[in-house]
Amino acid sequence: MGRQGVLIGLMAALTESTLRMLANAAHPASLDMPNDGVGSDHDSLGLFQMRPSSGWGTVADLMDPTYQVRAFFGGPGGPNYPSPAGLLDIPGWQTADPGSAAQSVERSAFPDRYQDYQPVAEAIIAALTKTPSLGNQNAAPLDTVAETARVVFPLPSGTWVRSSGYGWRDDTMTGRRAFHAGTDYAAADGTPILAIADGVVSWAGPYGQYGQLIVIEHTVDGSRVASAYAHMWDSGVHVSAGERVTAGQHIGDVGASGKSQGAHLHFEIRPGGAFEPSVNAEVWLAEHGAEGVTAATSGQSACLAGPSR
């Protein structure tokens, strides 16, 4: 499933049950099975509030958290294939808005609820995930990342305009409120993307709605920080996992892969490493004296309502 699938599953279970295995008096037998509380939504059971009457499984099945997870993710190996459909049975789930993907499985009468739990789900993933390599077994050890010599802005001066900032916004593709974990810079297709600091590449390749993604681990002022660069084309990734890079090195080219409406760089800063929560990248760059940050600040006056994610 990858991180994107885990994120969607967590958002769904947090919304439906606050991550609890709920019994239901509509099925008295469930009250005698291991549970974290009693729900009351029709005949819904468990983490994802699945209903026996909708074909998700028997009461005994749905009071088993492992079964519920397998049913939610579905696919040819899932217990209900092909119906009810799980996440793997939903075409395009990898690049869909996570809340919309969760709704495609849950089919709730309140479809906008799932997106409210995305920040919580992100925090859970950060807390439970200890490896900074994004699961890539080919990455070099990241405990030897040397202190960077400099910090730079990720795009050449004069090539971009800021198109979307960090934080809550109306998603340009769904129209719904959603949390934007990075800063978007609209630029011409093929514009060079620069590593912001010396470091080691921990991910280079496709990653869900990010499209083609590069993640680099750095040491800045004695602390670990990860930078992420998203939406390049397949041909726009010029580094590989485990490769050491230097500040200002040309690592990729601007594109529009993944969840994107046009050519731009989606840029994130994650203090502590790749799985930690992101912060406002523009503020972080300014605080760390990034070369070119003056141009970044002046570029905010040219904000667009166009391509972003």
Image (cartoon, rainbow, N blue to C red):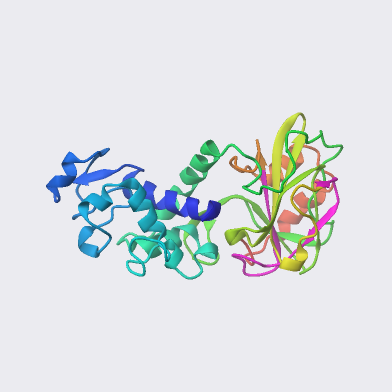
Q: Position of residue 170 (x, y in %)?
A: 52, 59
Of the pair 240 and 262, the residue shown nearer to us: 240
Left or right: residue 127 versus residue 253 is left
Query: Which quadrant does the C terminus fall into?
Result: bottom right
Of the pair 64 and 210, the residue shown nearer to us: 64
Q: Is residue 257 magenta?
A: yes
Q: Is residue 149 visible?
A: yes
Q: Is residue 15 visible?
A: no
Q: Position of residue 94 (x, y in %)?
A: 53, 63
Of the pair 179 and 1, the residue shown nearer to us: 1
Of the pair 33 and 163, the residue shown nearer to us: 33
In the current view of this chain or complex, which residue is farthest to the front? 77
In the current view of this chain or complex, which residue is farthest to the top? 222
Left or right: residue 127 versus residue 75 is right
Q: Position of residue 54 (x, y in %)?
A: 24, 64
Q: Is residue 92 magenta?
A: no
Task: Identify whether 171 is placed above or below 60.
Answer: below
Q: Quadrant of residue 155?
A: bottom right
- Residue range highlighted in magenta: 244-269
User: Looking at the image, which residue is at 28% across and 60% down?
Assistant: 56
Task: Identify whether 56 is placed above or below 128.
Answer: below
User: Looking at the image, which residue is at 70% across and 68% down?
Assistant: 263
Task: Identify whether 175 is placed above or below 120.
Answer: below
User: Looking at the image, which residue is at 39% across and 65% down?
Assistant: 104
